[in-house]
Amino acid sequence: MPAKADVIVVGGGLAGLCCALKLHQEGMPFLLLEASDGVGGRVRTDRVEGFLLDRGFQVLLTAYPEAQRVLDYKALDLHYFYPGAMVRFGGKFHKVADPWRHPLDGLRGAFSPVGNLGDKVKVGRLRRKTMEGSVEDLFSRRETTTLEALLEIGFSEKMIDRFFRPFLGGVFFDRELGISNRMFEFGFRMFSSGETALPAAGMGAIPEQIASRLPGDSLRLNSRVESIQDRSVILASGEKVTAHALVLAAEAPEAARLLGEEKRPASRSTTSLYFAAEEPPIHEPLLILNGEGQGFVNSLTISSLVAPTYAPEGQALIAVTIIGLPSLRDDQLTEAVRSQLAGWFGPKVSAWRHLRTYWIRHALPLQIPPLPDPTAPAHPVRPGLYVCGEYGNPASLQWAMFSGRKAAEAVIEALK
């Protein structure tokens, strides 16, 4: 490996990849260093016994502006969720549909116990609010917590408890709804204006597509950066590489370590379990939400109903999302989840085969107010050192990709 490079990008997640892609497009030589054995950061997919297991519940919202700009959706062969959810409450399942896309289903669900009729009207008010103006405008509005914002709109407690807590809990891993309302409103806008999708080859196909556009000798895997010194990095192997500029694109706790910060950013955790079944418990590509607020399971998807490529022919893949890291052994948690889901779907759950559990300690940063403005210009944290990704930015595929490009543009301008 060369002892020098024009730009070193530390971290091969979406932020680092998009930074590298922009540098490459502008003819700026770079070296991308990734500590693990593959690109993508947390956006990776494992193949287990013919099943595709994403590392934690993840989806692509096709309305993300930066994803539209960077990704080739056709090549990803996207498959789509039904725009709505199935909410478990009162021992039954209640379908909640997007009335703008499925008016009849929306009308049928207007009187469900998930919320009152007034709540359904207020969803329209929320939709109008989040669709007004530009994306940048959303991050300039008055900031509060998501819970306070929902109460200000006038949603009932049962609508918040039975729908918003499990739905947003599955997105932001926070059932208390303490996340910034700016991030919630941006997410709601994306869900409302586009499709919720899975690539045929799993979510890991997204970073792999970006990496395929980079020069083969510009990416080095299994290359953990031990420390940074001025405009140099020291690898775990002891090797030192110097550049004109460094871009730190690691996840927030690792970025804080490399920056020498004693206090590491707090994180939200999640646990994902995957089961194989001969038959899916439902037959629509819906997100299933726990509106009862009891038990470990927050939400559940049958990934193979969304994208049949996620499971071998004749089998179903069930993905379960738990918020946090339960203090149980893997086998104990598996049986607790199986017992809870047997109450939902009946004794057939006992035949489901556990494939794998992912314990993800750092799934997302807290994203509580005040939230950094992701549209603000990128500036070096010190001469020659730039940061992108979730450190100092909201966390989502959109803002990871956007921050990577923005950091590259700042580096290019500085080096010119």
Image: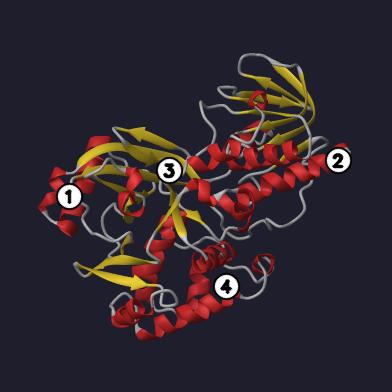
Which residue, given by chain and number where applicable, does mark 4 sit on?
130
Q: Residue at x 71, y 57 (%)?
A: 375
Disc 3 to disc 1, C-alpha distance? 28 Å
Out of 226 and 287, give the one closest to the viewer. Answer: 287
Mark positioned earlier in the residue sequence (1 or 2): 1
Neighbour tally class for label 3: few under 14, some 14-19, many 20 plus, Cα within 10 Å:
many
- Residue 116, horizontal then vertical, whole percent: 34, 82
Disc 4 to disc 3, C-alpha distance? 29 Å
Which residue, given by chain and number where applicable, does mark 2 sit on?
414
- Residue 397, horizontal then vertical, whole percent: 56, 50
Work out which residue is located at the far front of the displayed protein and give it. Answer: 74
Task: Look at label 2 and name its amino acid.
Answer: Ala
Task: Say which element carries label 4.
Answer: helix
The C terminus: image quadrant: top right
Q: Disc 2 or disc 3, which is closer to the eye? A: 3
User: Is 102 placed above or below 35 here?
Assistant: below
- Residue 89, horizontal then vertical, whole percent: 25, 68
Q: Residue at x 49, y 74 (%)?
A: 150
Quick check: marks 4 and 3 in contact, CB under 8 Å? no
Task: Look at label 3 and name its amino acid.
Answer: Gly
Mark positioned earlier in the residue sequence (4 or 1): 4
User: Is 36 placed above or below 103 here?
Assistant: above
Task: Say which element carries label 2.
Answer: helix
Disc 1 to disc 2, C-alpha distance? 58 Å
Mark positioned earlier in the residue sequence (3 or 1): 3
Mark positioned earlier in the residue sequence (4 or 2): 4
Which residue, given by chain and number where applicable, does mark 3 sit on?
202
Which residue, given by chain and number where applicable, does mark 1 sit on?
339
User: Which quadrant would residue 299 be assigned to in this image?
Assistant: bottom left
User: Which quadrant would residue 83 be assigned to in this image?
Assistant: bottom left
Mark positioned earlier in the residue sequence (4 or 3): 4
